[in-house]
Amino acid sequence: MKKILIACRAYYPDIAGGGEISTKTLSETLVKLGFDVTVLTISDSNKKENVEGVLVHRIKYKNVYWSFKNADAGPVKKIAWHLIDSNNIFIEGELKKILAEVKPDVLITSTIEDISSIIWKVAKSNKIRTVHILRSYSLLCPNANMFKEDNCNSRCKLCETITLPKKHNSKYVDDVIGISHFVVDEHLKYGYFSAAKKHVIYNICLGTVIDQRLYDGFKQGTIKIGYLGRVHKTKGIDIIFNALARISAELKGKIEVHVAGTGDEEYIEELKVLANSFGVKCHFLGNRNANDFLDSVDLLIVPSKWNEPFGRVLIESMGRHVPVAGKKVGGIPELLTDNKDFLFDDETGLVQIINKFVKGEIEFNFKLQEFRTENIINKWSELLM
């Protein structure tokens, strides 16, 4: 039985987003496949516990703060955190101790923040095979999103300087896995992971699949367009309202926009004003169960402005048989290769999609084989055997 050590910045019940959800799913899946799995994660204190069949080894952060809880950190503290995290010598001793205790055959770094890229160097010195999963741009950009007013086409000198130790340590990684081709290519473009084998394995996020949409606004008389996720300017929700402002008054009267998610309160107020000024009926619902929300809409729109590394909400939507329109950024186009009619560049493109969808001129192809859990598990099994 192979021993796997999965390292991450936070683990259930500490969940900030998709990275933590995907790490938990991967850990439990590997246990079911017969691997001996231990999770190494950062916390407020040292603690060992069993979480749903997975041994979790929590260690106290060795930086100026734990990035999972950094809401109150000022700019000076944040700069200090990034400088230390790039090659955190203060956590090195703890990492050596745990690797010696667990003696893993394979180390998987699922989210590298707070763990620090120094773990790759420590693992290499102990002849442990190392696999890193690219879920964001944290190795390239301190903000982890390569976005400043708009997507960054190149890296600024500050980003290059702060992340230089991460780039250096990436040479110790044996296999690098991207959750999309896009996110892998972005890192290779800047010379990362020069010695690693490259792979693309999508996140496990396809739940119960149904073959008929549960809500049908064409029969009910109200066509519901949905947005599901964090409410932030980088998510481009304003694009939906700007597009609806350009459709006919008759059609607009049949449409409601439902937004599920929380986030930037100032941006939410801006969106409410925008919707009202355009005469768009809109409901801000706060956090909702993903499947319950998807089962209440006709069309999901993912209008992100930043280069999303993946976009799990697209897969979740397809699993509920809800068509999804996505902006051509990041990894989103890869998930809609069989649905190019539902991809758009800007508001004009989204207007065309909405008009054609309502008129029945475009049809969504629910081709899910590539995203099915068993297919993704097989890829992981082949990689680790």
Image: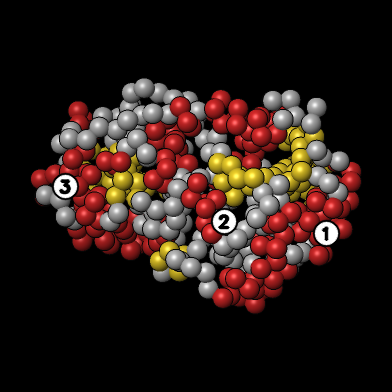
Q: Quadrant of residue 45?
A: bottom right
- Find residue 234 and report its horizontal and vertical position in percent: 42, 60
Disc 2 designates what residue?
188
- Looking at the image, which is closer to me, 355 or 287? 355
Disc 1 designates what residue?
92
Question: Is the residue under label 2 in contact with that under label 3 (CB below 8 Å)?
Answer: no
Which label sits in the foreground, 3 or 1? 1
Mark 3–mark 2 distance (CA, rounded to whole Å): 45 Å
- Side of 126 where 207 appears, left or right: left
Residue found farthest to the front = 195
- Find residue 127 and report its horizontal and vertical position in percent: 83, 46
Mark 2–mark 1 distance (CA, rounded to whole Å): 26 Å
- Residue drawn at point x = 63 percent, y = 63 percent: 70
Q: Earlier in the sequence, mark 2 or mark 1?
A: 1
Which label sits in the foreground, 2 or 1? 2
Question: Is the residue under label 1 in contact with that under label 3 (CB below 8 Å)?
Answer: no
Q: Earlier in the sequence, mark 3 or mark 1?
A: 1
- Side of 363 where 139 appears, left or right: right
